[in-house]
Image (cartoon, helix red, strand yellow):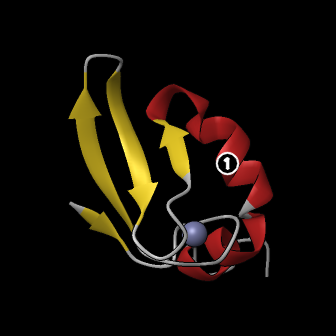
């Protein structure tokens, strides 16, 4: 599974991987690894990208 432009660091595409620590996402472009349990933190970092996907409910 690939999340396009989900990387909070470089806006690269991230794909979900799994190892002994559990599920995590890895950025294809910069190699940033993101534990899925920390995704809430990542969402606050990537709030700009997320706002576009939610069709601006506040507007
Ligand atoms: Zn990246």
Count of all numbered marks drawn on residues in the image? 1
Residue at numbered disc 1: 42
Does residue 26 lie above or below 30 as drawn?
above
| Quarter the N terminus occupies | bottom left
Residue lying at 63% horizontally and 82% vertically, measured from the top left = 52
Does residue 11 lie above or below 47 as drawn?
below
Residue lying at 76% horizontally and 74% vertically, measured from the top left = 48
Q: Quadrant of ligand 1?
A: bottom right
> Is the CB atom of the residue marked by disc 1 within 8 angstroms of ligand 1's nearest atom?
no
Q: Residue furthest front?
A: 31
Callout 1 crowding tier (Cα within 10 Å): few <14, some 14–19, many ≥20: some
Q: Looking at this view, is 30 or 50 the one in front?
A: 30
Left or right of 32 in this view: 57:
right
Please identify the quarter of the rendering in which residue 22 is found. Answer: top left
Residue lying at 63% horizontally and 69% vertically, measured from the top left = 50
Q: Looking at this view, is 56 or 49 the one in front?
A: 49
Task: Give the SS element for disc 1.
Answer: helix
Q: Residue furthest top?
A: 20
Does residue 27 lie above or below 40 as drawn?
below
| Quarter the C terminus occupies | bottom right
Left or right of 55 in this view: 44:
right
Q: Residue 45: image x %, image y %?
A: 78, 56
Residue lying at 67% horizontally and 48% vertically, measured from the top left = 42
């Amino acid at each position: 599974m690939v999340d396009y432009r989900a990387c909070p660091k470089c806006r690269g595409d991230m794909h979900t991987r799994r190892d002994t620590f559990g599920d995590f996402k890895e950025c294809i472009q910069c190699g940033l690894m993101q534990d899925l349990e920390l995704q809430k933190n990542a969402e606050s970092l990537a709030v700009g990208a997320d706002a576009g996907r939610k069709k601006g409910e506040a507007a």
